[in-house]
Each structure stands twice: as C-alpha cells, then as structure tokens.
Amino acid sequence: MRLQIERAIRMIPRGTVSTYGAVARGAGFPGAARQVAAVLRRSFGLPWQRVLGSGGQIKLTGDSAIDQRLRLEAEGVRFRGRRVDFKAHEFRFVRVGRAKKLK
C-alpha cells in the first residue's frame, strides 16, 4: 500500500495539487485518505506540498502550513483566500483497470 501511495504522490506534477482522498483513489485504495497522511509523515523526498485537504485547504498548522503555501506559490499555484484555485491547479488521476489475461 505504501509504495502505491508514494507512486501516486510522485505522479502529481509541479504546479498542480491533489487531495488526500484523490491520492488514495489514484493509488487504488479508495477511502484510505488517512493512510495517505501517514505515508507523507513517514516518507522522505515526496512532493508533500502538493497534497491538500478536500476543497483545496492546507490541513497543516503553524510553520508547516506557511512552508506548504510558500512551496506551492513557488510552483505557480494560485490561492483564493485560504484555498488553492482547484479549477486551475487540480491534478486528476487516471485509473487504469487491471489487464485481463488473453486466452
């Protein structure tokens, strides 16, 4: 599970964002948004700043929230108040079904 979630997070391009729930679905684990947060806490080298709460909100607090916003702004992500402009910056995962065995 961890590897699939990490792979999904790495797919999010610079200048775009996704939500914890969308990452979970993109990794093949719908409903596992909390596990996405756990992977982000325990993994290094991931573009963690590109994963937000539903509706484009930064869920971190204090200096971490400021750091996340600054990193996103440096990537060209625009905000509308405290939320990311999702229409302009949302990354949508394309889920490909499992290949069927040919007879």
Image: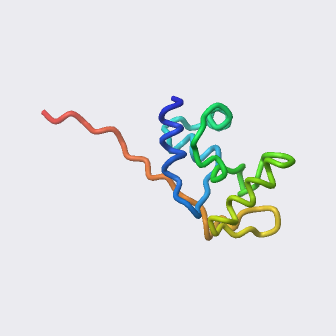
State which quadrant residue 74 falls in: bottom right
- Most distant residue in the right direction: 62
- The percent coordinates of residue 50 (x first, y second) are 63, 53
Q: Is residue 5 above or below residue 79?
A: above
Identified at 64% across, 46% down, the residue is 48
State which quadrant residue 17 falls in: bottom right
Identified at 81% across, 62% down, the residue is 82
Pick the residue in front: 37 or 42. Answer: 42
State which quadrant residue 41 falls in: top right
In the displayed structure, does residue 64 sit left or right of residue 19?
A: right
Q: In this view, does 26 lie above or below 15?
A: above
In the displayed structure, does residue 26 sit left or right of residue 61?
A: left
- The percent coordinates of residue 71 (x first, y second) are 69, 58
| Placement of the C terminus among the 4 image quadrants | top left
In the displayed structure, does residue 37 sit left or right of residue 16?
A: right
- The percent coordinates of residue 14 (x first, y second) are 55, 60
